[in-house]
Structure formats: C-alpha cells, structure tokens
Image (cartoon, grey):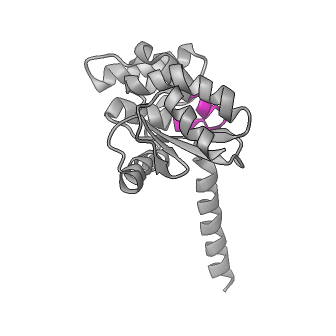
Amino acid sequence: MKKILFVFSLFFLSVTSLNAETKRIVSGNDDARITIIAYESLTCSHCANFHKDVYPLLKKDYIDTGLAKIEFRHFPLDIAAFNASKIAQCKQDQSLEILESLYSNQQSWVKGNSIEEVNNNLKNFLKDEGFELDFEKCINNKKIEDFVLNDRIEGTKNFKVNATPTIIINNEKFEKSLNYKNLKKTLEKLI
C-alpha cells in the first residue's frame, strides 16, 4: 500500500510540476471582467502590427486599468513560428517580454532561405537582446511543443481559428476588422 501511495504521489507531483512549468502568456489582472484571447503566429506580419498599433492602446486603456486581461495563445503558421513560440514559452519569468521583443523586432530574425538560417537568426537575436536561455533545449522540449500545438488545436476546435491574429473576447470570436476603434466599441459594451 505504501508503494502505491508513493507512486501516486510521484505521479501527482510530476503532473503538478508540469502544469507549473508551462503557463499561458498573460498581460493583466487575473480577475479582470474581460478576457481577451489573441491567437497569433510569431512570423505573421499582421500579428506584429497588432502588437505595434493596437496592443499598446489596449494595454493602456483596459489592461493596465484592470478592466481586461489578454492571453496570448499560439497558432504557428510555419516551423519558424513554431520554434519561436517554443522559445517564448521556455522562460516563464520572461515569456511576455520575449514575446513582445519577437514581435517588435520581427524583421530582425524572420529571414533566411532555410529553417536552419531562421533558427540561427532567432538564436542570435535572443542573445543580442540579452535573453539567456538554452536555445536547443527550448526548441526540443516536448512538453512545451505539446503546449504550443494544443493551443493551435484548441483554437481550431473551439473558435474555428483559421488565420492570425484571431481575437476572442469573453469566449466570443471578434468578427470585425481588427483595429483599436472596433475593439474599443466591443469592449465598452462589456464594461
């Protein structure tokens, strides 16, 4: 009986630590009335534009004020985005900072004639930005890989995501043209 309890407790601890290892990349108060989910691909130029033009206003007016939170979920459209997503998830204490840096400087690392060249550019970019992580360990981490792929599967299954960025507000797909004015109109109705 003691062996069974021991094995069960080891299993429980490993499941608990797995959940503790990989968390969603979130900006804002967990208790916010409005939850925004952004399905994105790190190589998507429209996603980078969202982070440059819309997200700062959204952050200032709704996230920093505690009215909303945003969860960034992965929907990689290619292998380079898939690897970058794994990198963003790899260092939990800097995930949001890494994600924002990858979007802000997308053209610095999304280039190359092969995935090896893109990975090398990504690796050098992260080093130049001062992010200290084990690149190979991050992109080869099976738990993170599954986490990223599950985001994509859940997005397709639950919200019919088929393009990036796709915005979900309180579990409803945002169907209007994605700009701050349209987002603001929708958010104001929920306050």
In-image side of 100 versus 30 (left or right): left
Along the viewing direction, whichever of 189 and 137 lies nearer the viewer: 189
Q: Quadrant of the N terminus?
A: bottom right
The residue located at (55%, 35%) in the rendering is: 185
How many numbered circles does the render carry? 0
**Where residue 109 sits: x, y (%)?**
42, 17
**Where residue 85 sits: x, y (%)?**
46, 35
Q: Is residue 104 above or below residue 27?
A: above
Q: Residue furthest bottom?
A: 1
The residue located at (44%, 31%) in the rendering is: 178
Q: Quadrant of the C terminus?
A: top right
**Where residue 27 sits: x, y (%)?**
64, 36
Majority secondary structure in the magenta region: helix
**Where residue 92 sits: x, y (%)?**
62, 38
Q: Is residue 51 above or below residue 75?
A: above
Along the viewing direction, whichever of 140 and 145 lies nearer the viewer: 145
Res 70 seen here:
no
The residue located at (62%, 80%) in the rendering is: 4
Along the viewing direction, whichever of 51 and 168 lies nearer the viewer: 168
Q: Is residue 9 above or below residue 138?
A: below
Q: Residue furthest left?
A: 113
Magenta range: 88-98
Residue 45 counted in the magenta span? no
Res 96 seen here:
yes
